[in-house]
Image (cartoon, rainbow, N blue to C red):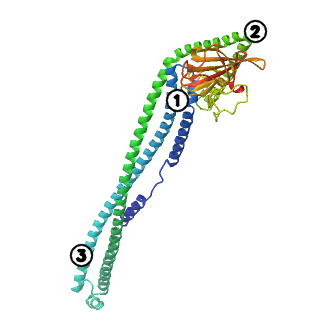
């Protein structure tokens, strides 16, 4: 009986033990990763405008698909991190619900064991009380407990006396033990009743906690399913955009050759206008080829470093705008071609984000919403105001010699002209309105500067 009581109490002690939730640190790490992914997405969103300029001279459908793909991958990064957090929370919630369910089941088993124990104690107590009542009746009748004189007088011999005395003592011990057993049993019954009340209170509390844990787990499961669906949807979008990009790659490579030819033709025309010799033209081409080769080597080196560091390869080019896209007050010969100069892409060699080839972004891009007035950076003569392939509607102005070298500027992607070929213009005169013609992906001004027929960074002259 004692062993059963101890077993029940030990079970109760074990039920009361609350384990520390597993994976708490892991969940914290996942939440940190989710925050990092959200920051990466925010940084990526800030660079979308720059990316659109990097995709200039790119097939419209491919450019749009790549911009979407970049946004989707930023969202996918966040969605996957959010899914990891949701699944970790689901695992934790299900674990908590299971532990509470197990504790509730253990408490109910303990309740049943105590009830069985109380039933046994009640039966034992009833039997003991019956025995005590019988002893009392026998004592009342004078049976079973002879006095000392009766033992002496009634004994037929010394050995008979000894036997009678031993029996008398045994009867007395039985009476005493029976009373002690009843007292112990009643004390145990009282303790068991107190324990039963406590266990039933625990069961009520655990049932409330278990019901709440089930609700939390169901909510976590719904959230996890939603996050999985979000990831699946983004993966489908990613796949669709990748298919568009792959399908249009060859057409874009063909367009690249055409754009390079258009740029070469423009440079050649400008060089012819200022009368460069063949030797001078060859020198310019060699310088451009050397600069392009250097840029390609730097891009390749960075891509390899990114791969070794496990980071996605990103273009490393000097054409990205500074953190402050508003340029300082100009100190050069040329003035800014927009009233509110806001640079979105600088001059320099850049890696095409889709096709991986290096090309020169031969000018500075200014934010200029569709129809924004564009002004001559200096006085001069309009060489032409016409459409020039990938440049769209272009105005080329010859500013004559500056410091012993010929200086020209071009204004590209106009929606319409405000000047005509051969017209004289003064610094700050309206020459046209920004647009999205040629291979532009959005309305803006692409501004180029030529010194002796070779492009230079416009910022060096502004």
The span from disc 2 to disc 1 (Cα, nearest Å) is: 45 Å
Q: Nearer the viewer, residue 315 or 5?
A: 315
Circle 1 Cα neighbour tier, 10 Å, few/some/many (<14 / 14–19 / ≥20): some
Circle 2 Cα neighbour tier, 10 Å, few/some/many (<14 / 14–19 / ≥20): few
| Residue at position x 75%, y 9% in the image | 279
Front position among marks 3 and 2: 2
Q: Nearer the viewer, residue 302 or 318?
A: 318
Question: Residue 319: x percent and y percent?
Answer: 64, 27
Nearer-N-terminus badge (2/1): 1
- Res. 317 image quadrant: top right
Asked which secondary structure carries label 3, the reply is: helix
Answer whether residue 364 is visible to the viewer in this image.
Answer: yes
142 sits left or right of 266 in the view: left
Question: Residue 191: x percent and y percent?
Answer: 36, 70
- Res. 360 image quadrant: top right
Q: Which residue is mark 1?
A: 70
Question: Residue 303: x percent and y percent?
Answer: 62, 26
Q: Nearer the viewer, residue 423 or 268?
A: 423
Location of the C terminus by quadrant is: top right
Residue 279 is labelled as 2
Front position among marks 2 and 1: 2
| Residue at position x 59%, y 32% in the image | 311
Asked which secondary structure carries label 1, the reply is: helix
Q: Which residue is mark 3?
A: 130
Front position among marks 1 and 3: 1
Vertical order, 77 against 381 (above or below): below
Nearer-N-terminus badge (3/2): 3
């Amino acid at each position: 009986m004692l062993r059963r009581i101890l077993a029940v109490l030990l079970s109760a002690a074990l039920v009361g033990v609350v384990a520390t939730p597993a994976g708490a640190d892991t969940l914290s790490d996942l939440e940190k990763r989710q925050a990092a992914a959200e920051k990466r997405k925010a940084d990526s969103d800030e660079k979308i405008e720059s990316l659109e300029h990097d995709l200039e001279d790119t097939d419209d459908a491919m450019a749009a698909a790549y911009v979407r793909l970049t946004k989707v991958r930023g969202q996918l990064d966040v969605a996957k991190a959010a899914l990891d957090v949701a699944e970790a929370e689901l695992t934790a919630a299900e674990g908590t619900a299971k532990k509470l369910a197990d504790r509730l089941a253990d408490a109910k088993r303990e309740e049943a064991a105590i009830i069985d124990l109380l039933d046994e104690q009640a039966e034992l107590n009833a039997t003991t009380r019956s025995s005590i009542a019988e002893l009392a009746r026998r004592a009342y009748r004078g049976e079973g407990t002879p006095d000392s004189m009766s033992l002496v007088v009634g004994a037929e011999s010394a050995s008979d006396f000894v036997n009678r005395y031993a029996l008398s003592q045994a009867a007395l011990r039985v009476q005493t033990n029976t009373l002690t057993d009843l007292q112990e049993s009643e004390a145990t019954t009282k303790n068991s009743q107190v324990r039963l009340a406590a266990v039933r209170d625990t069961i009520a509390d655990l049932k409330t906690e278990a019901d709440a844990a089930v609700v939390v787990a169901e909510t976590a499961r719904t959230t996890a399913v939603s996050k999985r669906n979000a990831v699946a949807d983004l993966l489908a979008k990613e796949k669709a955009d990748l298919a568009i990009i792959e399908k249009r790659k060859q057409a874009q490579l063909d367009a690249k050759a055409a754009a390079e030819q258009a740029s070469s033709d423009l440079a050649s025309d400008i060089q012819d206008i200022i009368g460069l010799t063949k030797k001078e033209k060859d020198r310019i081409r060699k310088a451009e080829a050397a600069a392009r080769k250097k840029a390609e080597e730097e891009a390749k080196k960075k891509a390899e470093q990114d791969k070794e560091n496990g980071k996605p390869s990103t273009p490393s080019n000097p054409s990205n705008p500074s953190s402050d896209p508003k340029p300082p007050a100009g100190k050069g010969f040329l003035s800014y071609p927009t009233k509110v100069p806001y640079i979105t892409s600088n001059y320099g060699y850049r890696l095409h984000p889709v096709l991986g080839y290096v090309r020169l972004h031969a000018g500075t891009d200014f934010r200029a919403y569709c129809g924004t007035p564009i002004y001559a950076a200096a006085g001069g003569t309009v060489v032409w105001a016409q459409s020039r392939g990938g440049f769209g509607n272009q105005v080329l102005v010859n500013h004559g010699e500056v410091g012993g070298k010929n200086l020209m500027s071009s204004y590209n992607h106009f929606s319409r002209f405000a000047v005509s070929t051969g017209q004289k213009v003064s610094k700050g005169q309206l020459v046209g309105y920004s647009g999205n013609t040629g291979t532009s992906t959005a309305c803006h001004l692409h501004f180029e500067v030529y010194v002796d027929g070779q492009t230079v960074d416009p910022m060096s002259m502004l």
